[in-house]
Image: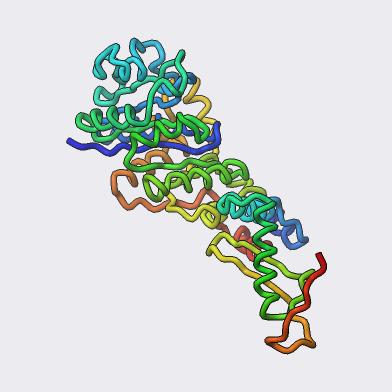
Amino acid sequence: MAWGTFVQRLLGNKGSAGLAKDRLQVVVMYDRLGLSPEQMAALRKDIMETISRHVAIDSERVKIDFLPTPAEVTITAPVRRGRTRGEEPKQQAG
Amino acid sequence: MSGRAIVITSGKGGVGKTTATANLGLGLARHDRKVVLIDGDIGLRNLDIIMGLENRIVYHLVDVVRGRCQVRQALVKDKRFPHLALLPASQIDQKEAISPEQMRELAAQLKEDFDFVLIDCPAGIEQGFRNAVAGADEAIVITTPDVSPVRDADRVIGLLQNSLGDPQLIINRMSTQMVQRGDMLDQQDVLDILAVNLLGIVPEDEEVVVAGNRGSPVVLNEKSQSGQAYGRIVRRILGEDVPIPELNGHGGIFHRLGKLFSRR
């Protein structure tokens, strides 16, 4: 029984518990935040605008993650080359 | 005397709130404490049948609150332990039949005569939940190691933290075999998500069904694994330092090795 489990693990069969935990961590974090998808989108837009005001970033590849334990927000924003700090950012169309 | 009022809650239905309330009540009574159990599930009375006391109900919770009888008249005495009593729910009223304020007063009154007032909370987070929590000084949250009960437990823990502070957690129906296979969240997984203090783990056990059939809660069956688990939880509630044992086979060398390979 235990051997079978062990061999299965070696073969890369992970069982569903890890998936359950990953999914729960995401859903619980959003439940705790109590933000609707619209509010999330607005938050994301605000964060990106704030960063863009100071640094040139690749807005297509910005990642905002909320992690439950320890509770933290991580923002990954790839910085573009070619613009010096303090330079006026280009206005986005629209 | 001023007893402790503890609400047993979960958010999700069917995870074992009523079974836990019955077992903790009997377990505490066996340690010679004076205990009263309040069935807070108005409209869906169930604690009476789990306790085997369904044939002896005269008055109920709503009768007491409405002043149709004295509290003493509504308490159903347990035959096994004379200092254990049940205050049954009404089967015909709605949750709105009582208010949080009335529940608070009732619990305060009962705390004068009993060491423990255990309140079995209905599922959900609406009026029935608010009533049950209003009467309590502390809370025990019960969950099973499945995605929806854990999610609901997190929500309920958030609500409780506003009023009663951090609750204690019981993980119910843990299957060693499924944990070993990697197909069930283990205790650490659940604690990583919920981040509260663990009061105990009750293993999956067919004896719980048999106990329900008989109206004789499993804590009275010393041979059953789940009964022993409830016995340990009761001692922890009484302040004893009782370690939480790893479930049978759990934590074996192969399991640990397997875990090393499977988890980040």
Place of residue B150 in the rendered image (x, y in percent of width and height, measured from the top left) = 56, 45
Q: Residue at x 53, y 47 (%)?
A: B154
Image coordinates for residue A1, horizontal then vertical, percent: 67, 50
Front-most of B78 and B70?
A: B70
Going by the picture, which residue comes out furthest to the right? A93
- Residue at x 45% of width, y 25% of height: B41
The quarter holding residue B148 reads top right
The x and y percentages for residue B263 are 65, 63
Note whether residue B38 is visible.
Answer: yes
Q: Is residue A10 above or below residue B90?
A: below
Q: How many marks?
A: 0
Judged left or right of residue B155, residue A9 is right
Q: Residue A42 is drawn in which quadrant?
A: bottom right
Residue at the spot x=47%, y=29% of the render? Answer: B122
Determine the image quadrant of residue A84.
bottom right
Q: Nearer the viewer, residue B117 or B132?
A: B132
Which residue is more in the foreground, B199 or A64?
A: A64
